[in-house]
Image (tube, grey):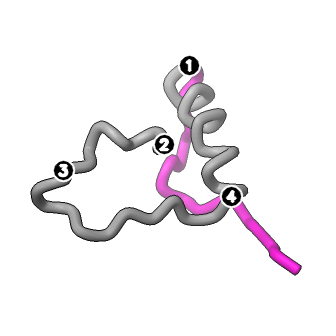
Amino acid sequence: MGVNEDEYNHKKDKIVSNASCTTNCVAPLVKVLHDSFGIEHPNDDYNTCIHK
């Protein structure tokens, strides 16, 4: 499902959402970069997605 699928608990979690396609594509790359080099402000929202 995604970079945090290990946190999903089928007994507790009732809603599953994959969010936007852009976020799903960029999240694994950002995780690798963060794990390898660190991101100074990891909770800031720098991913912008515009749909027509």
Q: Which is more N-terminal, label 4 or label 1?
A: 4
**Horizontal and vertical percent position of residue 37:** 58, 23
How crowded pointer 4 is (Cα within 10 Å; few <14, some 14-19, many 20+) is rated as: few
Residue behind mark 3 = 9
Q: Which is more N-terminal, label 1 or label 2?
A: 2
Q: Nearer the viewer, mark 1 or mark 4?
A: 4
**Horizontal and vertical percent position of residue 19:** 55, 65
Residue behind mark 2 = 2
The mark found on residue 21 in the picture is 4
Q: Secondary structure at mark 2?
A: loop
Q: Quadrant of residue 51?
A: bottom right
Q: Is residue 15 above or below residue 2?
A: below
Residue behind mark 1 = 36
Task: Please give the name of the residue rendered at 38% of the width and 42% of the height, measured from the top-left corner.
Answer: 4
Q: Secondary structure at mark 1?
A: helix
Q: Nearer the viewer, mark 2 or mark 1?
A: 2
Q: Label 2, label 3: how many angstroms apart (C-alpha)?
A: 14 Å
**Horizontal and vertical percent position of residue 31:** 54, 34
Task: Please give the name of the residue rendered at 21% of the width and 62% of the height, measured from the top-left corner.
Answer: 13
Q: Label 4, label 2: how many angstroms apart (C-alpha)?
A: 11 Å
Determine the residue located farthest toward the top in the rendered image: 36
Q: Is residue 2 above or below residue 12?
A: above
Question: Residues in magenta?
Answer: 37-52
The kind of residue tagged 1 is Ser
Q: Secondary structure at mark 4?
A: helix
Residue 5 or residue 41, whichever sits in front: 5
Q: Label 1, label 4: how many angstroms apart (C-alpha)?
A: 24 Å
Task: Please give the name of the residue rendered at 61% of the width and 50% of the height, measured from the top-left corner.
Answer: 24
